[in-house]
Image (cartoon, grey):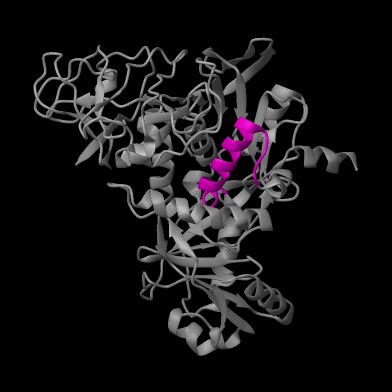
Amino acid sequence: MSATFFLPEEFKGAGASAKNRQSPGVGFAVPGAAFGMPGQGSPGARTCLGPADCGSACRVRQDSRNRADKPWHHCRGAFTTPGGSDRGSPWSTGPPGGSAGTGGSWSALCPGRPGAAATAPVRHRRLASPAHRPLVQDADMDVENCCPVHKRLPHSTTDTREMTRERVIVVGGGIAGVSLGSELALDHDVILLEAESSLGLHSTGRSAALFMTGYGPPPVQELTRRSEAEFTRLSELPGMPTLLTPRGGLFTAWDESSAAALTSLIASQPSMSALTSERALELCPVLRADDAVMCAYDLSTRDIDVHALHTYYATTLRGRGGQINTHARLVEATRRASGWHVRTEDGRSWHGDTLVNAAGAWGDEVAELCAGARHGLSPRRRTVAVARSTRAVAGDWPIVADVNETWYFKPEGEGLLMSPGDENEVPPGDVKPDPLDVALVLERVNAVTTLRLRSVRTSWAGLRTFAPDRIPVVGPHAQEPALFSFVGQGGYGVQMAPALAQAGAELFRTGTLADSALATALSPVRLETALDR
């Protein structure tokens, strides 16, 4: 049995009209989530339209006695009667074949309550307004024996005596903002503000889309490794495409110093091994492998479906009750005793208890606006071009790269996607590729291949924003604890997004991590200390 999640692409918030909430959206199927609601004038079983991730559809929290076996149960699902009306729905959205309406509380068929039949309902209640959503206690629910959707939920270790949900304002709609926002929306009211007309425009949408466990400083590599299991879990959700697909990485060294660096990399990465020039030529027939001093292959290098991952997090954020606002450039933020009052360029304003800075290249501007102190972030341009090739480009070629990251290329349709590995510091903005960098990568790739590339089909540039030590900045701002920093993901933001979002949410809720060394490495305080020295 399955339930389909059908979420509007442009959810308008609590004040949205029924018409707005019926706009087409993205559909995911949720296994094991059969829901029913007797009465209300609608015959037959109803289908839950809660999000694909079980945490999106329902909330599990411990009761005021802090007992893990008696959680709270809170559901944001919508429902519809296949082929029938939808009166009594807390959200008026439904797939083709059903109509939408409002009103009423509802029940979910779930075997999770002791002493109940397999079809006994778990109590759910219609949500209050986004500004105040009380949790609904169901002290008899047994999550361990619950249906598959509910059973996967993590148990909270937080006492939830307080019935109101804090409001969090997240600034930035790239992979950082939507991933952390979706995690926080489990137990907070989240309002995301994106300055542009669409999400993920400057960095996420221009990513090279690679997953490499050996890329970046040690904390980044650790977060990337931890993310792999979550990528796998998400890929197994019904309707979700495979987020990581095999690519392979062929890394090369063209002088002795580069060979030493590659040897060191092989020693630190279990998935990487040295290759003969003959084997390298088999993997990429256009490579001048005989001229290379050393080659190595990494089995763990994969392509990431960045669009699907970003869409999942944005959809989950909305499904958990969060609001996403575009054309919302932050221009004013005032800290008051009651929380933050923020205003955007178009005159809209919001109030929140805590502000999350996930503004990417604009992270320092937001930090200065809100706390009067920057982190020392450095936005850097990365150029990418897709070249036309007179020779056939096989789709199964690995990514081929210089170990010093002065160039890389990989197949892109019938062409070749390539980059000179540039990191030119630029002001935050809508960056464009420099023609000199495009010419440079053509020259470098031609020098190591037999392709004889002459022109490019298209080119673009994106922003990769680094802290001085190239490690993400995650935690309360040193000068303003009510400002939570989630910036400095550099060129690793997508590949470590799942684990970094989970770590960020844990730091947000508790102020610490089980891995204290990682918490220290991510802390914004380290940058203050470095500046003091």
- Kindly report the secondary structure that dominates the magenta region of the rendered protein: helix
Horizontal side of 91 relative to 528 (left or right) equals left
Residue 505 highlighted magenta (yes or no): yes
| Image mark count | 0
- Residue at 37%, 12% (x, y): give it: 15
- Could you say which is closer to the camera, residue 310 or residue 381? 310
Viewed as shown, does residue 18 lie left or right of 11? left
- Dividing the picture into quadrants, the one containing residue 383 is bottom right
Kindly identify the residue that appears in the image at 69 percent across and 44 percent down. Answer: 519
Residue 285 visible in image = no
Place of residue 343 in the rendered image (x, y in percent of width and height, measured from the top left): 58, 15
Is 428 situated above or below 100? below
Left or right relative to 429: residue 102: left
Residue extending furthest toward the right: 533
> Residue drawn 47% across and 13% down?
131
Q: Position of residue 352 (x, y in %)?
A: 57, 17
Q: Which quadrant of the view contains residue 11?
A: top left
347 and 226: which is toward the camera: 226
Q: Is residue 3 left or right of residue 226?
A: left
Q: Residue at x 61, y 24 (%)?
A: 355
Residue 394: where, in percent of width, then height?
36, 73
